[in-house]
Image (cartoon, rainbow, N blue to C red):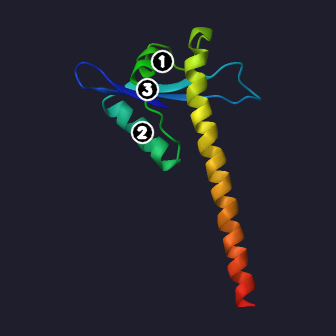
Amino acid sequence: MAEFEDKEKKRAVVALRYDVDKDKAPLVLAAGSGPIADEILRIADENKIPLYEDPDLAQLLAKLEIDTEVPPELYTLVAEVLFFIYKLDRMAEKREKLISKMRETEKEKKR
């Protein structure tokens, strides 16, 4: 998800989806500014969807229609977003494994 502020200080938000198994390219799922942007951000927060801020990219993506594939010209820029999300996912996995190990160690100490 990317967001930007335009000249009138209206924040716009763009939500993307990319499922390697289903999608040929990333899709624009939602986009908006003002109250719509607030709602997109609320839903993202509720679902623990990470945010990636890139004003220039958000401006470009906001011009696309909903349910439209990201055009090849933007693949490199969107790849940066996807890599950011991938890194966050990997960090979360490592954190969960560490927490699990710590819990197991605590259980063993109590025995």
Of 35 and 61, nearer the camera is: 61
| Image location of residue 73, percent across then percent down | 58, 9
State the residue at coordinates (71%, 82%): 107
Q: Residues within 10 Å of mark 3 (few under 14, many from 20)?
A: some
**Residue positioned most to the bottom:** 111
**Amino acid type at image mark 3:** Asp
Give SS at disc 2: helix
| Mark seen at residue 54 | 3
Sequence-wise, which precedes: disc 2 or disc 1? 2
Residue named by callout 1: 61
| Image location of residue 14, percent across then percent down | 46, 27
Q: Is residue 69 visible?
A: no
Residue named by callout 2: 41
**Residue positioned most to the left:** 8
Give SS at disc 3: loop
| Image location of residue 13, percent across then percent down | 41, 29
| Image location of residue 77, percent across then percent down | 55, 19
**Amino acid type at image mark 1:** Leu
Q: Nearer the viewer, mark 3 or mark 2?
A: 3
Up/down of 61 relative to 19, above or below: above
| Mark seen at residue 17 | none
Q: Residues within 10 Å of mark 1 (few under 14, many from 20)?
A: many
State the residue at coordinates (46%, 46%): 45
Of 31 and 108, nearer the camera is: 108
Q: Give the Cα distance between marks 1 and 3.
A: 10 Å
* Rendering quarter of residue 94: bottom right
CB atoms at circles 1 and 3 under 8 Å apart?
no
Sequence-wise, which precedes: disc 3 or disc 2? 2
CB atoms at circles 2 and 1 under 8 Å apart?
no
Q: Give the Cα distance between marks 3 and 2.
A: 15 Å
Of 110 and 49, nearer the camera is: 110
State the residue at coordinates (67%, 72%): 102
